[in-house]
Structures are given as C-alpha cells and as structure tokens.
Amino acid sequence: MTKPPPLRRGDTVAAVTLSWGGAGALPHRYEAGKRQLQDTFGVRVVEMPHTLRDPEWIAGNPKARAVDLMQAFADSDIHGIVSTIGGEDSIRLIPWLDGETIASNPKVFVGYSDTTVTHLACYRAGLRTFYGPAILAGFAENCGMFEYTIDAVRRTMFSTAPVGEIEPNRSGWTDEFLDWADPGNQKRARALNESTGWRWIQKSAGDADANGVVSGHLLGGCAEVLDQLRGTPVFPQPADWQGAVLFLETSEDGAGPDYGTHLLRSLAAMGVIDRIAAVLFARPGGQIAVSRHADYDMALLGVIRGECARDDIPIISNMDFGHTDPMTVLPYGATVTIDSQRETLRIDEATCA
C-alpha cells in the first residue's frame, strides 16, 4: 500500500463535498472549520468547483462531486484532500471514481462516516487514507479543536515518524448536538461526559505470541456505509480481510445493538469474521445513553464469540473514533499491534512517507 507524502505547513489542501451539501448550506460552520484547520496546522484550504454548492444541487449531481475529487487528486498543486462532511449517498459516486488517478497521485485524504466509500475506493487503488475529522465535524469544533484530535492529526498526517501508541482520550468526550444552523452556537463549548477509557471486552492471544500480542492491518469504517457497500466494486475482497483489524463505528442515526448483530452476521456469512485478527468498536454514535453502551458489547460478543466461536481475538469497544468527539485518526492499511495483557494499541509504522 502506497503511503502519501506528509502534509507540511504552507501546503494546499482541497475541501471536497462528496455527499451532503452542508458546506453550502451552513457557510459560517464551513468557514469556522476552514479557519481552524488553517490556523492549527498552517495549511491553505481551497475549494473545488462544487464544494460550496447548495444541498439540492449537490444531491442531483453525483458525477460533479466525483469529478471534483478526481481533479483534486490530479492537481499537483494540491497536497491533501479533506471531506467537508459525511451524508448518505457517496455510494452514487462509485461509477466515476478512477483508481488509476488515485494511485498515480498519492496524497493525504481524510474524512469519516459516509466518506467510508471514498476510503475504500482508495484502498482498492492501493493508497493509504485516514479515517478522521471532516471540516464541519472535527475541524469546526465549537470554541476550537480538541487537543486529542489535533495530536492525532499531527502524528498520522504531518509526520514520517512511527505513530506509536494510541491512548484513550482522558479529557472528557461529547456527542451533544448544538444546532449548526445557529451561528451563535459556534462560541458555545459542548458539554463533556466523563472519559472512562476503552473496554477490553475480550482478551485472547489467538495466533499471537505467548504474551497475547496480535498485529494486523486496519480496515473498516462506518457500519451503515459498509452495509450499503456489500457487493459493490469498492468493498474489500476476501484477501483484504485476512489478518485485518476490523474497525467499526455507528453514525449519528443511532443504530442500535440489534443492527450491529445483523451486520456482524452478514460479515460472518461473507467469511470476514473468520479472517480478521481483532475488532475495534467505537463509542456508539447518535446520542445513545451511556447506560446502553454495554448492550453493544453484548452484540459484539454474541456474534463474534457466541456464533462464530472467535474467542481467540481481542475486541476493544468504547473507542475514540467516528461519531464521537474528540476523535483519533485511523490510517487504512497501517499495521497495529494490540497487547491484551498491557491493554495497549500501537501503530507500528510511519503512516506517511
């Protein structure tokens, strides 16, 4: 897998709208994210031709969205690409995504949620990308970005040093939604919940060494989007899942534990669960009551251990990625090492080159 060059201060980063047209509908929110991205990391953010079109136009023109993305990859003056926000119909871009253009122009690409579609298209093309913040969500965080996210972005996308250990966020987390349509909310910090760390709901050596250490490459995304993508040209092939560390998160729609059970059963029927080396599950999205978070653990264990007899792989839940803030960054294809005894997760390599 090709590693992109790292971003540096002064680089130009393109903002692309691949799904919902939130950047055009909420210009004050977009400008806040653009400003904080530029000020925090010293890059220059530019828009592609259709980035700021209104949601109705964006919805009616999937080809134009794809063309914006391909132009951003092909333009040698653009050093990185960031998704403005997720949505629900990036799948419509697939016919116009050109793997050769992506492969021939390796550069940092970051986003999450519905942007899973583009991540997997890049994965198929052999390019490492980064599951992390978008301009409207993450970079535009009220009252400034979270330090936990800033640190993750710098270590993964602005460096050629090995990333090292990824630690749980200890400074409080939030999924509170303050209406983006109200510009005044940009100056209101969201309420924080106590950080209780990750949950190591299954610890096992499996094929690991005697100390219970497992390594594998990161592959996954937003659960609802992966569900849509089964059978499409961008869904990972069986060989891609061999030895993979599957990471999953649920969106702001608040998919319940039963949904997780159904998706995992589908992946099991496809042979995915038999091939993976570990599972990473994020804190549930969608303002799910904390008292219900353990229900997702039971869904994971019910399918993976109970139905698939995979009691030989580590499973970590309540993690800080996806639809929770602050979020870390997960680089597709990067090798991670999970030590169940010490309860550590480490990215063993540099994720840019």
Image: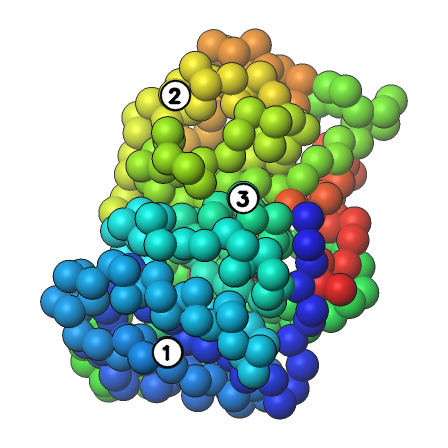
Figure check: 156 above or below 230: below
Label 3: which secondary element: helix
Mark nearest the camera among 2 and 1 is: 1
* Residue 293, picture quadrant: top left
Name the residue located 46 percent from the left edge and 77 percent from the top edge: 14
Which of pointers 1 and 3 lies earlier in the amino acid sequence? Answer: 1
Q: Which of the two residues, 100 or 79, is positioned nearer the viewer here? A: 100
Name the residue located 67 percent from the left edge and 28 percent from the top edge: 243
Which of pointers 2 and 1 lies earlier in the amino acid sequence? Answer: 1
Is residue 161 shown to the viewer in this render?
yes
Mark nearest the camera among 2 and 3 is: 3
Figure check: 100 above or below 28: above
Real-space CA distance between mark 1 and mark 3, rounded to the nearest whole angstrom: 24 Å
Residue ID for mark 2: 266
Is residue 289 shown to the viewer in this render?
no
Labels 2 & 3 near each other (Cβ < 8 A): no
In-image side of 152 versus 282 (left or right): right
Amino acid carrying label 2: it is: Ser
Residue ID for mark 3: 124
